[in-house]
Amino acid sequence: MALVLSGQGEKASPILKLGRKYSAYLAYPLLLASIVWLLLLPFQTFTRNGYFSENAMMPNQVYTVFGTEEHMSAMNHIDAELALQSTAKDEGERQAGAVYRAFNSLGLDSEIQRFAYSEVPGVGSTSGINVHGVLRAGRSDSVEALLIAASWTTSSNRTNINAVRLMAGLAKYASEQVYWAKDIIFLVTDGGEHGIETWLKSYHGGGGLYVRSGIIQAAVCLELPPAQSYAGMGLFFEGKSGQLPNLDLVNIVQYISRVERIPAYLHGMVDASRSSTWLEKYKRSAQLLLRQVSSLAIGKSVGVHAPFLRYRIDALTLSGIVRPTDSVSLEYLSTGVAPVMPAPFTVRAIGRTVESTLRSLNNLLEHFHQSFFFYILPANERYISIGDYIPAAGLMVASLLFQAMHLWWMQGSDDMRSDNPATRIERINAYYAFLRRTLPNTIGIIARVHLLGVILLVTPIAVPYAVLTNTTSTAYVFTMALASVSMVLHISDTYWIESVQRMVDWKQLKAVVELYVAVVVGCLSVMNFSLAVVLFGVTGLPLVLTRVWTSATKMRRIANVCMLLLASPVCTLVLSRAALGLSPLDFTSSPFRMFLGDFYHFGSLAYPLVCLVYWPVNLLCMIVALMP
Amino acid sequence: MKLSSLFSCTVLVLSLLAVAFGASSNEEKVTQFFDSSETQHTNNWAVLVCTSRFWFNYRHMANTLSMYRTVKRLGIPDSHIILMLADDMACNPRNSYPAAVYDHPRKTTDLYGDNVEVDYRGYEVTVENFIRLLTGRVAPDTPRNKRLLTDDKSNVFIYMTGHGGEDFLKFQDSEEINSYDIADAFKQMWEKQRYREILFVIDTCQANTMYSKFDSPNILSIGSSKKGQNSLSHYHDFDLGVSVIDRFTYYNLEFFESVDLSSKKTLADLIAAYNRSLIQSDPGVRTDLFARDLKKTYLTDFFGAVQNVELTAEAFPIGGNKVKKSSVK
């Protein structure tokens, strides 16, 4: 209130005076600073070396023993069981039956869970089968558990039978040992993330699971596509809505895998070599960071670890990196025949990595709590903590706030801003009259645009399920886009009529929208920094740059609207479809549908943010640009 | 138990007398022996405390049990040893050698094998219990094995190990004892004539700060590392996946391997044996409270049960007991 009244000639504090004087210019340097801050993050000097916080874990302090004859034969046993089950009615039943019998023969408490799920609310129904076996820690009390999981297909849509075989070998190894303080659960699903989610829901009280254990402390998911050997492993850790596993887990797996000579690289990316130039190093880090940001913002990552994070189970995926020239891989791709296990030394290295990780996790005394839960990783075994990256978000928000402050001060006619003490009362009256006249209209415009967003949000959830196919969802988005454009044109057109021009002020509208975006981005940045940055990039940044001129010409308006169209949801959805590796014209998989599915199954934030913030703010920007 | 220890004491005394007479048969020496008996101790006690808990602190339990084995080997009976352990290692599910505790990767000696008498176990190892034990302020129903039944002729060896810092030592990761607490407990012990001499040994980070506040007489203190220094672990066992002993304790024990009941090695010899490059920290010794010359103080005065006999000129008034008894009736 002081800010507002002092604008009308009240005694202003020196800080306010200063703020008012410079707020017009402050937004741009702050915006620039936030971008520079983000660009500086990939520099090695601004990152820190990874370390272990949790003393109890003691990674790499044991001899590993995995890889004996018995372990190898337990792995082959899976193939024998698969051959035995050839009479099963479908592939899922056959695989599940084989794994169930193999787990049982290793002495695990096993269970088969059959379930059905729909990818997007109600669109069709896919059935899936989970099998899990629990290795009981004989000398402990079954109150805590560790989990190893695999899906029958990898993210690249290849068979993941190698991971299932390895799990059988690991189960054999684990059953020989006496030192487990926690149960070990081996989980195989054929439903990908949905299978894991269903299983977790049942495990945590949803019903339908009878073979149970205690609280799951950590999970490692495996993806081992057919290959002769692997060039290393990719480590994927991003969950939905910016959820991340504790950094300690990522660190120990990186450290252990390096010692076991099958290094797990973040996103499968090898660091730039020590001798490379700073530019190469920078580019490498930036690339890795961008991959994380896109994974975290969209909520799509390699592997099936994401659902675990929602249940406060620290989890990550290890995925074998296949060389393009690998003979076994090429053979599989051409014939589709499930091939043999990778070379023994590769199997042993991966097995020992998991073994050593299990022993380290076995030492945990309480839930992971020591290290960071918010981080981005610029290179293998390095990290950027929340304290180092959050200022960028602060600068973005500050830029919005300063511009909003300036616009609020500049709204209305110039005589409301004179310094003449004699006209003070008049000015205050004029100011309130102005607000009474314009504010309801401003709020009205924002509400109308948001109503469109609500319709956009609700319709796909409310319509009959069968209607919502891939093609219709794409058509739906474009229809909504058309509706939006006509709405923008209608609203901005309305206020060009001479008699109602005084009823609105674009400065006020822009200021209120800026405050709104600042609040959303600010709150989001502490939860999901990547999503906040992306959201700022598509809403805040165009908003700050909208109508920056002093006098609006036709050309300027057109240029402005073109920029806003480039930043519009439809445009970015098409672009992100291309980024996801799909042809822009391929309508079988739309990001919109993916967001919707993630929102429905995992409560991920991308979908409501697109509908309720991104879409309306983009339209509001256009309205600001086109208003008188 | 009591009978056997009495018996062993008698044998010891007799053997000592035999040595005294046989060596020189010098009457002067005999009189000297009995004269000095007033200033010498007649019984030995040991208080061994492991203040850590949890699997990754395996080495602290191994430290304490190794020290326990040593003082026991040198003759202090279980009845005179108060052993305080969190005791969650031997039966820890993570232990790949169930029911055993080792202090060396060779695993030649199972420290948790036969005949280990733990007096304060698990959650009984608290700061309060430790101070009550030292000062004797225990509840009347406290069993005998949980009492430090010392007197003004007792030499007490106190060994502590765990995680500590400047002027404090953590107890089971939930509370701390500080150097003033221990100094105060020792002061109360002196006032109550609960000791004749104390040898205080502590192996923890910044251990030397822990004895800096002592102000009672006849205390010799040894710490493993100076202020600002860590006390490091020694052997790591890759079967168990933990470190099994700390450096300072290890090199103390190595020295004690050359000591037996008849040894004439002195505390000065022990301190001279400390090798900074092996221990990798600076062990500290505080002698200003200790009246005797370290070169003339035998290790067995604290670690063994080499006892002296105090002769009384007059008959001990056993009759008094009778009167008491009848009066009770």
Image (cartoon, coloured by chain):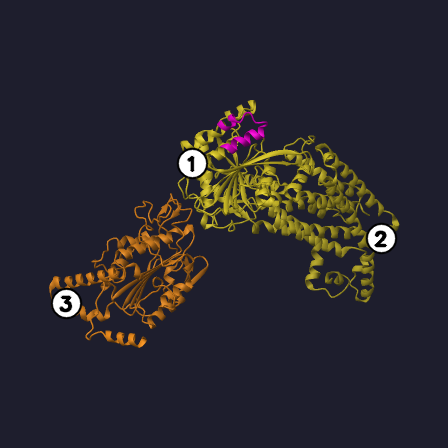
User: How far apart, in angstroms, are the residues tagged by discs 3 and 1?
Assistant: 69 Å
Chain A palette colour:
yellow
Label of residue A502 in the image:
2
Badge 3 density bin: few <14, some 14–19, many ≥20, Cα 10 Å: some
Q: Can residue A159 be seen in this view?
A: no
The rendered magenta stretch, by its main secondary structure, is classed as helix
Q: In this view, does A213 lie above or below A349?
A: below
* Residue depth check, mark 2 versus mark 1: number of the one nearer the observer: 1
Q: In this view, does A44 lie to the left or right of B242?
A: right
The amino acid type of the residue labelled 2 equals Arg
The residue that disc 3 covers is B29
Residue B37 visible at all = yes
Label 1: chain letter:
A
Badge 1 is on which residue? A66
**Circle 3 SS class:** helix
Q: Measuring from the top left, give residue B46's x and y in whole percent.
A: 31, 61
**Distance between mark 2 and mark 3 Cα atoms:** 120 Å
Q: Looking at the picture, which amino acid does disc 3 mark? A: Lys
Q: What stretch is highlighted in magenta?
A: A80-101
Q: Chain B is drawn in which colour?
A: orange
* Quadrant showing the N terminus of chain B: bottom left
